[in-house]
Amino acid sequence: MRFVLLLLLLSSLACGLSAGEEEATEVSEASNISETQTEITRVPTDVPVQEEPAPAATATSVAEPEPTAEPTLAATATSEPSATIIDAGTVLLSLPEGLNYRQQMVARIDGAAPAGGPGYVQWNIASDFLTAPLQAQSAQITFADHENEATTTAMAQIGAQVFSFMPEVGCFIFPADAGNGLDINSMLDTGLGAIQGELTLVEAGVEINGLLADHYALTGANLSDDSFNGMARDSFAGDIYIARDGNYVTHLHMEGLGLPEGTAQLDQSQPASFVYDFDQFPLLEAVTLVPAGCEGQLPEDLGYPRPDDAYSQTTTPEGLFFYTNLSLADLLDFYRDSYTAAGYTLTDDVVIGSLAQLVFAKDSVTATVQAVANGDTVSVTVHEE
């Protein structure tokens, strides 16, 4: 059995981390400064990951969407009777369009470690999806296994801007170009793919996630061929709760057995068990999407001079990184003029072929500009300390 859940979650994590790493690599090449490894803050594995309460929206330099008008969500009786058997294909895996919503997921696979003894991998994800007036998404992604304590990445995508923050690594802000942003989609749509056949009622009128829902049994027969990458259906059992107001999945619990193919942290030749819990519900309160460690770190917030044609602007712990189509000579003249006009003194001016570095000083502040020319493009890093 292959656990697509693993692939799904790794891809969710990798989309943000790889983007940050790629930008960091480019910055390193442009600056020609040796990288130093920073140990990620560790959290005890046994301590459950708790989602922080959504704070009241605060003013940031990025316009935050307002929550949509509050729908009718009270868990009250409805005149429509619950069907004993329903067509699974009519159930929505994500909320109807026009609603902001929150998704929470915990997934764990327990099996054998490659070196012997028990092993496990676990993911916790909490994500807010905003659909109006601006498409946006935030996510808290925590990963742990039997060899590594939990690490958490906070991410957000607001319009075309992506934010990523890891403790002691810092904040990366970069454009949501193809392949390096969060997907504005549903975890359940991506992992479960689709459900089919008939669902049999277990209990009607259950209150869950503040909603009135009906509880149905979910079996292997309800999975399509691509659901969780075609896991072994004869070892699968689950429960699905469908909100009466909206006909969408508000809670899902699944358990199964199989071989953890594609899970490097486990012995893929030994059987493993998995447990998956998923919740989603309308998001009514205002939320702050930008990770706390990224507030005030947008390129315009830093106040560093940059040419008008600067593009693919990225802020990292190393400073501001961007590209320009100015020639190397024109770019250097721009920074000599800009910093001199701001009262800085040029203390270092080095140009070696396609590489250049300028250093300016003013009082206790040192500004460094490093540039690398490559054809018609120049990559630039600016840092003040």
Image (tube, rainbow, N blue to C red):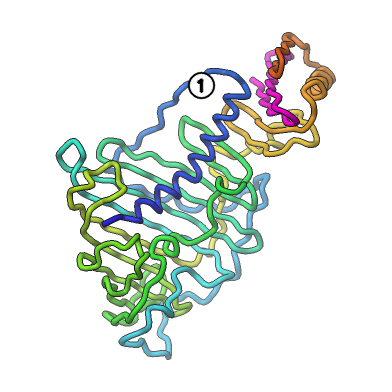
Residue in view at x 49 percent, y 70 percent: 95
Residue extending furthest left? Answer: 117
Query: Is 6 left, or right, of 112 in this rendering?
Result: right
Q: Is residue 172 above or below residue 159?
A: above
Q: Main secondary structure of the magenta part?
A: strand
Q: Quadrant of the N terminus?
A: bottom left
Q: Residue furthest front?
A: 375
Image quadrant holding the C terminus, namely top right
Q: Residues within 10 Å of mark 1 (few under 14, many from 20)?
A: few
Residue 182 locus on image (x, y percent):
53, 51
Q: Secondary structure at mark 1?
A: loop
Q: Relative to 219, does residue 66 appear above or below in the rendering?
A: above
Question: Which residue is at 63% across, 37% downward?
Answer: 296
Q: How many marks?
A: 1
Give the x, y percent position of residue 173. 60, 39
Q: Is residue 188 left or right of residue 222?
A: right
Quadrant in the picture for residue 366? top right
Amino acid type, label 1: Glu
Magenta residues (range): 358-385
Q: Residue at x 56, y 50 (%)?
A: 289
**Horizontal side, residue 164 vs residue 188: left or right:** right
Q: Residue at x 32, y 80 (%)?
A: 199
For the residue pair 248 and 89, the one nearer the viewer reads as: 89
Taking the magenta stretch, the answer to whether it contains residue 194 is no
Give percent across and percent down for residue 245.
Answer: 46, 79
Q: Is residue 51 above or below residue 101?
A: above
- Residue 280 position, x and y percent, is 43, 64
Q: Does the magenta segment cover residue 383?
A: yes
Label 1, on which residue?
35
